[in-house]
Amino acid sequence: MLTKYILFISLLSLIFVKLPSARSQCVDLNLFDHTQRHGKLCPQIEDSLKKGSSSLLNPIDAPLEQIENNNMIQILFTCDEKNKPELCKKAKLAFQNVANVISDTLDFKVPIIINASFTQICGNFMNCDPTKPGPLGAAGPSRLIPLKDDDGKTRLYPQSLVKQFKLEKHPEFSEVDIQAGFNSEISTFWFRGDPEIGVDQVDFELVLIHEFLHGLGFLSSWDDYLSLDNPTALTPFPSFLITTDDLSSNIGPIKFTGFQEYPFDRYLSLTKDNIPLSSITDKINQFANSTTTFANEKEFTDAFTNSSQYLECKQMLQNSITRNSIVFKLPDDDLYPIETSLVPYKSGSTLKHGDYDSFSNSTDFLMRWKSPRQVTMENLLSVNGNDTNYINPIGPKTLKVLEVLGYTIKNNNNKVQTDNEVKQDDNQHNLQSTSGTESTTIHSSTLLHVLLMTITILLF
């Protein structure tokens, strides 16, 4: 019954989804630069599948390799193989396994292209605090595309999801669907073939799956886009009209076109009064008409922070740090609790994950904000509630979330094959187990600030 219901809703969504204009304004994301934003005019085109193969993440001199491990997930892999050949082989195998896991779980209609870098993040992509542990890495959509939903609201969809709709006409796609960068300079990662996992280590493959799910659209737009260092209020993504390609909105007059949600936000509700967050978005959008012009960002910020609608945004911050205050509504009155227990508010973690306590010792452990330590893909019993029957890192409720967003889940999603050994021949990409035993089966199917920051999901 659940599958039929979701299928019916998905079909209705495809029927009623419309493109807002002949020249849509897309949003291109920079994964690690919190100051860059790129609004881009995306003309509608009919040929949706022509893609390039350039690296968008890597500013250093390292070769780009396409991992031809399966037809539905294509990975453009960058690693410092000259200086770290063995580590790069381990990382490459992990990316292969994760691509296999996800494609064995999700029934992609159109291939997904992932630009993946395993390299030094600090100094190349971002400045890091030397007194704190380095970031593990991040992944996110490379482009957000505005689509009008059947409720009349235009939301910013991750490109990977838009491709699955197979629209006859759509805004122009970016060269890749997901950008991913992971830190090769830390000892936190555990790889297949390493000695027994340490107490402070995380399985690199679990991190990859988690982050790739963010890239597929498991994330909310709600954040503080106006105050990076001291969050005081939350809004969905603030959108500004641009008139020339790649024009930054902080140069000259700008036209505010409203706060835009992601598809994930459509299903979020407050638990205390069952109010959908989309209705709060509607209230906030009363701030200005869709074409209100401001001299610059400062004038917009001053006007908005002095408006009555800003009070709603301040209340949303309080909601985001109140335990069990927000849920993702699933079919059949099922609920997926969202992370609202972190105090103070933590950008990139709050509202972007499942509730940590609710999904501890649960088959839905994967999308908590902190990666599980001393746990490997081949033995999830310590984190999945000791469930010996469910061996997929992506839990059943997480799969329901992805299905509600618009992805199709395969029926045999609890059986996934991975490779246990690093191959000596780089031309071989067989993902069957090479251990001589039955193939390992694991079920795992796995920004943004653009006005003032790009949301990156950094796991520490």
Image: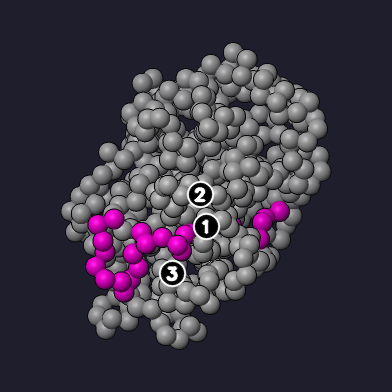
Disc 3 + disc 1, Cβ < 8 Å? no
Q: What residue is drawn where x is 35% and y is 78%?
A: 421
Tell whether position 177 is magenta: yes
* Sequence-first tag of 2 and 3: 3
The CA distance from mark 2 to mark 3 is 22 Å
Residue 64 to residue 2: above or below: below
Quadrant for the N terminus, please: top left
The CA distance from mark 2 to mark 1 is 9 Å
Q: Main secondary structure of the magenta part?
A: loop
Q: Which mark is residue 121?
A: 1
Which residue type carries mark 2? Cys
Which is more toward the observer, 282 or 408? 282
Residue 15 visible in rendering:
no
Mark 1 nearby-residue class (10 Å; few <14, some 14–19, many ≥20): many
Disc 2 + disc 1, Cβ < 8 Å? yes
Specify start and end residues of the magenta stretch as a single range. Answer: 172-200
Kindly report which numbered mark, 3 or 1, lies closer to the viewer in this rendering.
1
Give the residue pinned by disc 3: 91
The spot of residue 446 in percent (x, y) is 42, 56
The quadrant in which residue 435 appears is bottom left
Give the residue pinned by disc 2: 128
Which is more toward the observer, 87 or 311? 87
Tell whether position 151 is magenta: no
Which residue type carries mark 3? Ala
State the SS at label 1. loop
Residue 70 visible in rendering:
yes
Which residue type carries mark 1? Ile
